[in-house]
Amino acid sequence: MGDLIIRNAAALTPDYIPPRLIDREEQMNMLNMMFGDYLKSPGSFYARALLIGGTGTGKTITSIKFGEYASRNSTVRFIHVPCWTHRTMHSAVRFIGESLKISIPRRGFSSEEILEIIYDHLKDNGIYIVVVLDDVFHIVNNSGADALGTLIRFYDEHIGEHDYHFSLILIDRDDSLLVKLDAGAKSTLGNNIIRFPPYTKDQIYEILRDRAQAALMPGTYNDEVLEMIADVTGASGGNEGRGNAKQAIEILWKSALTAQQRGSRRILPEHVRYAVKNTLVIHVGELRGMDLHEKLFLLAIVNALRRKRDSAYVTFGEAEDEYIMICEKYGLRSRRSHGQLWHYLKDMENTWRIIETRPSGKGMRGRTTLISIPYESLDVLAQELTRLVEFELAVR
Ligand SMILES: Nc1ncnc2c1ncn2[C@@H]1O[C@H](COP(=O)(O)OP(=O)(O)OP(=O)(O)O)[C@@H](O)[C@H]1O
Ligand SMILES: [Mg+2]
């Protein structure tokens, strides 16, 4: 057994809440500006904000920290809705209802009706809440921008209502929501946009230093190791797609694990290099959010691409064939229709952003869709997906 390097693995997981936030004072202050009066005199107006920033820029943790801070000084309750789990409007409002312990019949109610039930409950009991829809693009992709617009414009339908029992924080990764919303919803959100820029190398370094201190044994790492990880993940010189703290923490975790597995007493640069090569750009947690057959279909695309070697693309048909084979291998019936697989494909492209597609050009008979995975190592992806799929099948 290797020497112990990780003393508190929980501090390296996505659920961990760090005691302090690095360099997000500006975003916290803006939240305070937009919500301060609502917290001080609950119901006095309709507070709302849209947080926008790339993955791993601290949107979730900042909203959670703000909720914690608010609940110390106010009776307003924060309800944080993880839209990666509650991916439709219906599921999201149901979750809000459950959080408030309101009993809503399982069937027969639309999301608008459930929202009315929730609102009546809030009014009857004098409760004020802030709803945080985190990664709201899931809802837009599954229920449409109109469904979200209806929620945003809720008070338009309740003219004369001067007691605002819920306020709203939306979290998204880019500006596309603003294009999709109707004019009314857009103007309701107004200019209340809070941006989360990618983290610089220095900021990532600071975040990593706190994490390492909380998670690792003293003397098992040095500044250089953390700097190395900050160099690969921190934003610099307009490097698109960098500045992701999630990825940095995952690399730290994998570096420590590698050192431990190799029987080293401390993390060495070579362990970091190995960890960098073996960490996905997409967060493993996101793969976990896919349903079983979506994972299998992605694995099919990966396997088909791996077999090709000299070509960067597979056709939709090839992926479909591979999917049927994989289902057979696991003794599952490949009951997903062409249309369902197509839906998965669009989901992987637009929601998870793990694949790219393009229509086939000249030289191919008939028109088909070509699929590629430019961002990830296929070997690592296959390994992680296989692990997740086999785990899921084992616990079924
Ligand atoms: N300013 C910070 N200080 C300390 N830790 C941070 C900071 N920002 C982010 N982190 C940590 O980095 C990880 C990613 O942050 P978070 O989950 O908030 O990102 P996000 O913007 O919500 O990403 P996504 O769009 O993928 O959901 C978390 O573990 C979080 O605790
Ligand atoms: Mg988040």
Image (cartoon, rainbow, N blue to C red):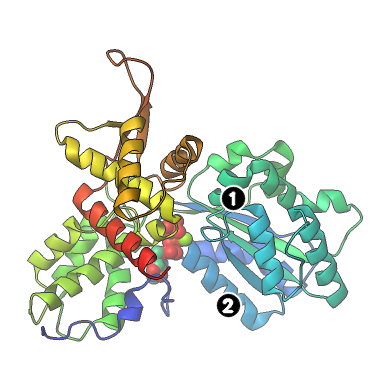
Q: Residue at x 34, y 67 (%)?
A: 391
Q: Is residue 90 above or below residue 101?
A: above
Seen at 45% across and 55% down, the residue is: 291
Question: Residue 126, position in %: x, y?
Answer: 83, 76
Q: Which quadrant holds the N terminus? A: bottom left
Mark in the foreground, 1 or 2: 1
Apparent side of residue 314 relative to residue 60 in the rendered image (left or right): left
**Callout 1–callout 2 Cβ contact below 8 Å:** no
Give the quadrant of residue 68: bottom right
Q: Camera-side residue: 107 or 278?
A: 107
Is residue 54 at all visible to an observer of this figure?
A: no
Image-quadrant location for residue 180: top right
Q: Is residue 246 left or right of residue 302?
A: right
Q: Amino acid at mark 1?
A: Ile
Residue 298 at x, y percent in the picture: 35, 46
- Give coordinates of residue 19: x percent, y percent: 42, 80
Identified at 30% across, 33% down, the residue is 318
Disc 2 marks a residue whose amino acid type is: Tyr
Q: Quadrant of the C terminus?
A: bottom left
Q: Nearer the viewer, residue 366 or 198?
A: 366
Q: Residues within 10 Å of mark 1 (few under 14, many from 20)?
A: many
Which residue reaches farthest right? Answer: 160
Task: Provide the residue designation for mark 2.
Answer: 69
Position of residue 39 in the picture relative to residue 376 (left or right): right
Q: What kind of element bears circle 2? A: helix
Residue at left offset 29%, top offset 40%: 373
Where is residue 252 drawn, in percent x and y? Answer: 23, 69
What residue is shown with label 1?
Answer: 139
**Is 133 or 74 nearer to us in this picture?**
133
Query: Of the residues under marks 1 and 2, which one precedes in the sequence?
Result: 2
Residue 137 vs residue 152, the one in the foreground = 137
